């Protein structure tokens, strides 16, 4: 007998954080300062200071090339036959699988703040945030991972929520 598989995916772009913006500003400020220093010390023939400015410029250029793509983060949620994968996409090309949750280990899933999750509020657990950080309505998934309870925040679309509800109708709530 053929069993129909269920598949859904959702891509969410994460909002830039204040820390990321601050780090970008600092990297650009160091780059401008080191270029200015190289120009000033080159014209004044201060070779040692010119070399130090060049070292700062080189290190900062490496950090800019390495770090700037890391500030652009997308989350991709892939639901396949009772498992949901949370993948982080850095800079549009580097993909990292952050988590894979099997619905057999899931306790409950509901919109964040739902009364269905009230019984888990007193339980101490780690929170993993795979959302866009934009303040939109998130969905909370409570599950067992590595012998501990984990709370996962994410933003699935309606199609993925329906697939999750079809797989575990007694564990997934939409109110």
Image: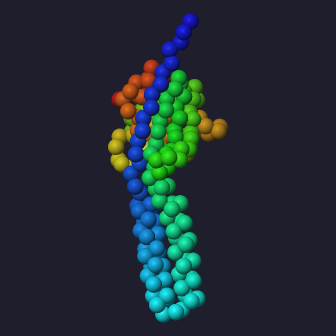
State the residue in front, 113 or 58. 58
Q: Quadrant of the N terminus?
A: top right
Colour setting: rainbow
State the residue in front, 57 or 43. 43
Residue for point 46% across, 47% down: 92
Q: Is residue 61 visible?
A: yes
Q: Position of residue 107 (x, y in %)?
A: 53, 30
Q: Give the side of residue 161 with respect to residue 106, left or right.
A: left
Above/below status of 23 relative to 125 = below
Residue for point 42% across, 35% down: 10
State the residue in front, 59 or 1. 59
Q: Give the side of residue 65 with respect to residue 146, left or right.
A: left
Above/below status of 41 relative to 142 = below
Q: Give the side of residue 29 with respect to residue 147, left or right.
A: left
Q: Position of residue 18 (x, y in %)?
A: 40, 61
Q: Is residue 170 visible?
A: no
Above/below status of 40 relative to 75 = below
Q: Position of residue 64 (x, y in %)?
A: 49, 64
Above/below status of 100 relative to 124 = above
Residue that sits furthest to the right in the current view:
147
Q: Quadrant of the C terminus?
A: top left
Q: Position of residue 73 (x, y in %)?
A: 45, 49
State the residue in front, 127 or 39. 39
Residue for point 47% across, 36% down: 77
């Amino acid at each position: 007998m053929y069993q129909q598989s269920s598949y859904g995916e959702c891509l969410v772009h994460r909002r830039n954080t204040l820390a990321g913006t601050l780090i970008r500003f600092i990297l650009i400020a160091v780059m401008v300062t080191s270029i200015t220093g190289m120009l000033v010390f080159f014209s004044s023939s201060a070779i040692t200071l010119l070399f130090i400015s060049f070292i700062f410029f080189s290190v900062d250029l490496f950090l800019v090339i390495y770090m700037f793509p890391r500030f652009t983060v997308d989350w991709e949620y892939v639901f396949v036959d009772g498992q949901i994968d949370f993948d982080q996409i850095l800079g549009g090309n580097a993909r990292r699988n952050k988590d894979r949750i099997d619905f057999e280990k899931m306790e409950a899933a509901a919109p964040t703040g739902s009364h269905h999750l009230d019984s888990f509020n007193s339980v101490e657990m780690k929170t993993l945030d795979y959302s866009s950080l934009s303040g939109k309505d998130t969905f909370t998934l409570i599950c067992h991972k590595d012998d501990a309870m984990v709370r996962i925040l994410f933003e699935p679309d309606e199609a993925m929520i329906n697939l999750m509800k079809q797989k575990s109708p007694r564990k997934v709530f939409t109110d």
